[in-house]
Image: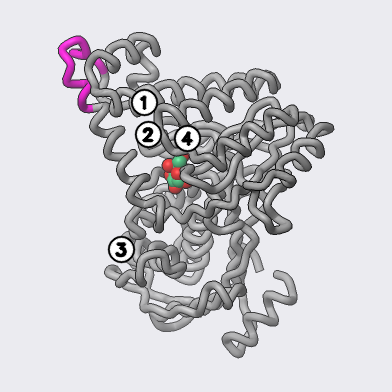
Amino acid sequence: MESATRDAFERAFGRPPVRAARAPGRVNLIGEHIDYCGLAVLPMAIERAVRIAFVARPDARVRLVNADGARFGPREFDLSTAIDPAPRGDWSNYARAAAQALAREHGARCGIDALVAGDVPPAAGLSSSSALVVACTLALSEANGIDARREMLMDLCARAEHYVGVESGGMDQAASLGGQAGCAVLVEFDPVRATPVPIPAEWQFVVARSAVGVEKSGRAREAYNARVAECRAALAGVRAAPAARGWPSTWRALVADIEEQRLLALSSTTLDGLLSRRFRHVVTEGFRVQRAVRALERADAAEFGRLMDLSHASLRDDFEVSCPELEALTAAARAAGALGARLTGAGFGGAIVALTRADEAGRIESALRAHPVAARDHDAVFRASAAAGASLGS
Ligand code: GLA
């Protein structure tokens, strides 16, 4: 633990911290808006992380102080199986989410004094919120002597986060817990599994944040939940078609068992325009993830980049989660020579990710940094390296 963290903890709580939890953010490389359909996705954990210094308490009180106290004031609540949420958008709701799930599912009773710090940019589509849920879950598990397996935590954290009112899937939590240095993480669901896939050394992913912030539990919440409901309706609509008699019931089995063109042909004659576009995104993105994993395994950067471009177009045209700023940044990355570029995370604002050869990354970064719609702080554009998953330390 850094001495600045230790000092800040002592100033806040009058005693030294004992343990530290670290949970990274993530950048999703491909497989967007399909995790909640149970389809595999391919993110990677990044070096930016939420870090919590903490001490277990003998009672149920959870006291949180944020290192960025000007933006995120101190919060307190009691750990229980029914924790009242703070107002919508309040940062402590992610800690409340973790605490309630651990109390309900593992009988957690002990609270913590905790100093929360980190460098995952918030509201950027890089999963600062899930990193906070994961870090709090690790800290509270440790304080309560809960010995948790990674997959169990992935599952628990994903469900816990529904507390904030977003029906999100399990990608972010699995990436944060399952990351490995130098590797993308193939996340599969039901049951959740995270398999590392090495990224060739000469590949470089560059992340650029747009000036449009996107808070999952804020402005984007209704639009996100609407997509989840539309996907459900699209699947039900296709399955009800007489021509789909005998087809499997889940997206995963459909993508595994039925040819892409047959799925698309049936959906376009069965569903209305909007649901048919949503269906097409989910199916084509599901197949793109499979192709992207193969491209990664054979170090075919051109093909991986092409799939990123196709993913972006599908998110824009069929899933309708892009915005002018993300269009401008992906176009700028491509114009500067990126092999592919796409919005990353839920969309509606936030960030893009571009793939380039490492020796050409500087040119892409300069073009993105100079773009008028990029965020204006020093941290708006950065090279993302695949980092290790969440951990506990001292
Ligand atoms: C958010 C959610 C994820 C996932 C992405 C879109 O990050 O938390 O579960 O659905 O959006 O791919």
Q: Which residue does the numbered mark 4 point to in the structure image?
A: 32
Which quadrant of the figure shows ligand 1?
top left
Tell me the magenta residue range.
236-247
Q: Which residue does the numbered mark 3 point to in the structure image?
A: 104
Q: Nearer the viewer, mark 3 or mark 4?
A: 4
Query: Whole-percent x and y of residue 232?
Result: 26, 34
Which of the two labelled residues, at mark 3 and mark 2, occupies the earlier sequence position?
A: 2
CA distance separating discs 4 and 2: 12 Å
Question: Disc 2 marks which amino acid?
Answer: Gly
Q: Is residue 59 left or right of residue 325?
A: left
Q: Residue at x 36, y 25 (%)?
A: 252
Q: Residue at x 65, y 60 (%)?
A: 119
Callouts 1 and 2 close, C-beta under 8 Å: yes
Which of the two labelled residues, at mark 4 and mark 1, occupies the earlier sequence position?
A: 4
Callouts 4 and 2 close, C-beta under 8 Å: no
Quarter holding the N terminus is bottom right
Q: Secondary structure at mark 1?
A: helix
Q: Count residues near mark 1 (Cα–Cα under 10 Å), then give few for <14, some for 14-19, many for 20+.
A: some
Which of the two labelled residues, at mark 1 and mark 2, occupies the earlier sequence position?
A: 2
Q: Is residue 215 left or right of residue 246?
A: right
Question: Disc 4 marks which amino acid?
Answer: Glu
Which of the two labelled residues, at mark 4 and mark 2, occupies the earlier sequence position?
A: 4
Q: Which residue does the numbered mark 1 point to in the structure image?
A: 252
CA distance separating discs 1 and 3: 30 Å
Query: Whole-percent x and y of residue 304?
Result: 63, 23
Question: Disc 1 marks which amino acid?
Answer: Arg
- Disc number for residue 212: none
Pointer 4 residue Cβ closer than 8 Å to ligand 1: yes
Q: Residue furthest right?
A: 359
- Disc number for residue 38: 2
